[in-house]
Amino acid sequence: MRARLNKAWVLFSVWFAHMSAYRAEIIIWMLSGAIPLIMMAVWIGKARAAGGETGGFNEQQFAAYFLAAWITQQLIVAWVAWELDYQIRQGHLSPKLLRPMDPMWEHFAGHYSERLVRLPFMLLIIAAGLFIVPGTRLTPDIGHVMLYAVSVSLAFCTRFLIAYCIGILAFWFDQATAIDDFYFVAAAFLTGAFAPLEFYPPALRGFIEWTPFPYLVYYPVRVLTGAAQGPEIVRVLGVQVLWAAAFYVLRLALWRRGLARYGAVGA
Amino acid sequence: MSARRYFRVLGIFVRASISAQLEYRVNFAVNLFGSVLLAGGTLLGITILYSDGVALGGWSYRESIVVVGLFTLVQGYIGAFLYPNLNKIGEEVRQGTMDFNLLKPVDAQFLISSRNINVFRLTDALVGVGLVVWAASGLEGASGTGALLGVCLIATALMIVYAVWFMLSTTAFWFVKVGNVTELFNGLFRAGQFPVAALPGWVRLMFTFLIPVAFVTTVPAEAIIGRWNVESVLGAGVVALLLLGVSRWFWTYAISKYTSASS
């Protein structure tokens, strides 16, 4: 156990140092994921045009929703599909396989420690958002913040594992990153980063509820803003655990099949 | 060198790019699927925004779709022409191969802006034009003159996008390590999928003057749907020429400071 903790600590501190060196690039990536902030402006414009409220949301509630959506999107970002695709096609995966550790953990440590680099700049944007729309309450109490931390961690694991599964597809064909692009376009409109799901046509919403998408942004946001209470939070966390577990199992199955097929450059 | 020779060189680049990419024909299907997905998602977004029946900043549903079409068209332009060329500047500065561009007997800016064309990303442009034509055909305000003016304004829009993208990529001469600076524009340009009137007060001003997104999609759309005014048309022309001039100056300044990778 001690040895494992030690291993994890070394991985995270090395990757934290690595990511800190790229802080300027990371801030640019953060600003490029501006969809929730742009949508915040558009929906506030709609609320104003409708006389202060539309669909049960007023200006402050839209601000809280989209600020929370932006934070959530920042915290679940995953680019592992691209890294894996590159490593598999270029043969860089081979030396990693010699280590007594699943290569997934190195990617995981990289993604996880990158969140810490994002944090200071994230707080700055939140402060700016709260200042620009006065009277916005992002969260009702510290309890919801802690439950959100659990919920967004599960959302991150799910998104990370989805990206990992997509990256593994590079064992079979060379357009794996295109599939991740498709995921990105679909996620922009189905996770709730574009609009609260209340505004979706009922038939479409009924369908989306059966996919993992709303559990990546929409439901964690409801947990943070306090729109979700007791029983709903329990249900959300339960479903999130199920999705994360499902993709973990899928990842493992794909990984074993893929490795059996792997013939690296020169091998 | 005369303009004719530049056109000849451009023709050679286009032919070379096309023949290099026709080898990967599956990419065409993959890109077309991606374009349809992007346009479908954006349309879904517009539909959701109109679900309460209130017009978005005074723009009807169909009028907004003209904006969506132009947004998709510009995305295709970026993917086909800007990304495969300008985003290589950083890499070339890092490796020192930028020197070879500066030594050739053609204008270096022309060379690094036109060498590669990602033909398959033109699927976005196709889908975008399709959306504009479909949406405009059902609008009363749409006319021949409006369409003609729209085409001219799309040209100024592409100049604006080129100039901004080019300036951002030129910063690579100083910030060699920051390889993704054009994503800044890409992220903020998402606001261009809506008519700028949909944004509240000062955000609208920001996307008109600070980041000229309004001139890229909203102003050409206004011409196409027959709601244009002289001020914004002239404004688009002035902004385009100004940005092209500034970007040219910035580029000359950057290469005058460039000392190559090994020195």
Image (cartoon, coloured by chain):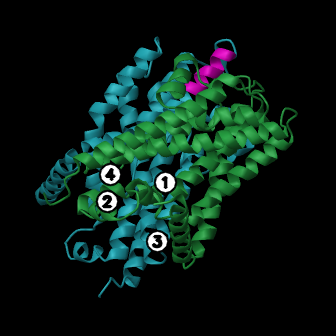
Mark 2 or mark 1, which is nearer the start of the sequence? 1
Q: Residue A169 shows which numbered tag?
A: 3
Distance, label 2 to label 4, CA atoms, is 21 Å
Where residue A70 sits: x, y (%)?
Answer: 45, 34
On whether disc 3 and disc 2 are found on a single subunit, the reply is no
Tint of chain B? green
User: Which chain's colour is cyan?
Assistant: A
Per the model, the C-alpha gap separating discs 3 and 4 is: 26 Å
Residue assigned mark 1: B82
- Please state which of residues B166 and A166 is positioned toward the viewer in this rendering: B166
- B97 up-or-down from A56: above or below: below
Chain letter of disc 3 in the image? A
| Disc 1 from disc 4: Cα separation | 15 Å
Chain letter of mark 2 equals B
Return the x and y of residue B24 as percentages of the image width and height: 55, 76
Is residue A229 magenta-colored?
no
